[in-house]
Image: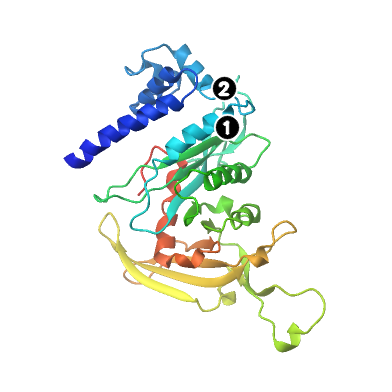
């Protein structure tokens, strides 16, 4: 960071910090010290150890009380006002896009394993990758759904930090996608956010490729969702009636020929295709091929009429200098009324940032 930027950033940060202090409710001084301790933490392995940080001048009892009391309960009359004040400050830190024409967000579920905590309430089975071959990727504890803004690189091309906007524990009686949907409704429809009414892109993993999730996102006119999908999915082309079938009586036909991702004999010629090369961090030059099929459909339900929401299907293939495919092709869905405003390269680039929602302390690559 150069000196002029630093000179400008320090006063701005002090002003923002003062506003944050005023927006906090009970125990605001303790909360501010806790934030300082957390921000400078390098080795604390538990919440209680944060109280040992030199920036936290109180004991660990004050730490837990601050966490419990800094916001009123969600059913308290003062909760909406307190939440809005904090959310306004956090959303104001999201920089407007400059090199791209959209705001980028990600949502994912982060596991918090606590298998040996005897007093922790509402523990449940959670997904957690396991390095031991043959073991199921599960654990016991809590899971947290996190929605984060993914800023673009600045002038120095350094990877920016993610900006967590909302984090919420997934109760044992709810699904991940249901909690994520509530969070997205909050950040997209909040009256004071800088991205309201502007093109926004949401990037998610294959967990969120279900109709129940995508069927809700397509209701937002300014949102485009890009998600990974499993290679065993089956989609359909739109049915184009002939003159004879157009006059037939009965229920109209919506779905045409099948597009089976695991059966390339059902694939048609791509509507778009891009070839390019890129260099890995180790200096190896590889080939990249992006293929796109437009106006595909997925089966709907009574609640989600997915035949009304066609999408773009992307296939990403990486090969070496000899043309040999290196990895299993990656499939993506791009859905939303403004999906064609994104280029194929933009769709491919933003999906790589999705992994950073799993840990908001990491940087966007």
Outermost residue, right side: 250
Q: Is residue 324 visible?
A: yes
Contact between labelled residues 2 and 1, with CB atoms less than 8 Å apart: no
- x and y, in percent, of residue 211 in the image: 64, 56
Marks 1 and 2 sit apart, C-alpha to C-alpha, by: 32 Å
Q: Is residue 143 above or below residue 60?
A: below
Q: Is residue 258 visible?
A: no
The residue labelled by disc 2 is: 117
On the image, which quarter does residue 126 sit in? top right
Q: Residues within 10 Å of mark 2 (few under 14, many from 20)?
A: few
- x and y, in percent, of residue 187 in the image: 52, 44
Which residue appears at 36% of the width and 13% of the height? 57
Which residue appears at 55% of the width and 47% of the height? 189
Which residue appears at 44% of the width and 52% of the height? 104
Q: Is residue 319 left or right of residue 111?
A: left
Q: Is residue 305 above or below residue 26?
A: below
| SS at mark 2 in the image | loop
- x and y, in percent, of residue 103 in the image: 43, 52
Q: Quadrant of the N terminus?
A: top left
The residue labelled by disc 1 is: 80
- x and y, in percent, of residue 261 in the image: 57, 67
Q: Is residue 363 above or below residue 308?
A: above
Q: Earlier in the sequence, mark 1 or mark 2?
A: 1
Q: Nearer the viewer, residue 248 or 48?
A: 248
Q: Is residue 301 above or below residue 163?
A: below
Q: Nearer the viewer, mark 1 or mark 2?
A: 1
How many discs appear? 2
């Amino acid at each position: 960071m150069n000196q002029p930027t630093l000179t400008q950033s320090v006063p701005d940060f002090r002003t923002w910090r003062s506003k944050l202090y005023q927006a906090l409710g009970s125990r605001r001084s303790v909360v501010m010290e806790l934030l300082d301790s957390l921000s400078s933490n390098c080795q604390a392995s538990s919440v209680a150890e944060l109280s040992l940080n030199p920036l936290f001048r109180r004991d660990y009892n004050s730490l837990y009380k601050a966490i419990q009391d800094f916001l009123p309960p969600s059913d308290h009359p003062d909760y909406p006002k307190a939440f809005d004040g904090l959310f306004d400050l956090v959303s104001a830190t999201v920089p407007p896009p400059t090199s791209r024409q959209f705001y980028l967000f990600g949502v994912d579920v982060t596991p918090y394993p606590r298998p040996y905590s005897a007093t922790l309430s509402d523990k449940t089975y959670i997904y957690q990758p396991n390095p031991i071959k043959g073991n199921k990727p599960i654990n016991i504890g809590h899971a947290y759904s996190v929605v984060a803004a993914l800023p673009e690189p600045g002038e120095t091309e350094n990877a920016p930090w993610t900006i967590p906007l909302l984090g919420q524990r997934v109760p044992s009686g709810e699904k991940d996608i249901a909690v994520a949907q509530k969070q997205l409704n909050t950040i997209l429809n909040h009256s004071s956010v800088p991205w309201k009414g502007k093109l926004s892109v949401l990037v998610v993993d294959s967990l969120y490729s279900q109709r129940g999730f995508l069927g809700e996102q397509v209701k937002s006119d300014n949102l485009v969702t890009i998600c990974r999908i499993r290679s065993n999915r089956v989609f359909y082309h739109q049915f184009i009636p002939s003159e004879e079938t157009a006059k037939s009586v009965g229920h109209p036909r919506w779905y045409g020929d099948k597009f089976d991702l695991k059966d390339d004999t059902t694939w048609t010629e791509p509507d778009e295709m891009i070839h390019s090369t890129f260099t890995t961090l180790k200096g190896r030059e590889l080939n990249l091929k992006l293929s796109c099929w437009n106006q595909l459909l997925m089966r709907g339900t009574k609640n989600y009429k997915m035949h009304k929401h066609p999408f773009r299907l992307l296939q990403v293939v990486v090969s070496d200098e000899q043309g040999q495919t290196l990895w299993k092709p990656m499939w993506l869905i791009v859905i939303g009324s403004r999906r064609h405003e994104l280029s194929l390269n933009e769709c491919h680039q933003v999906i790589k940032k999705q992994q950073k929602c799993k840990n908001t302390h990491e940087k966007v690559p």
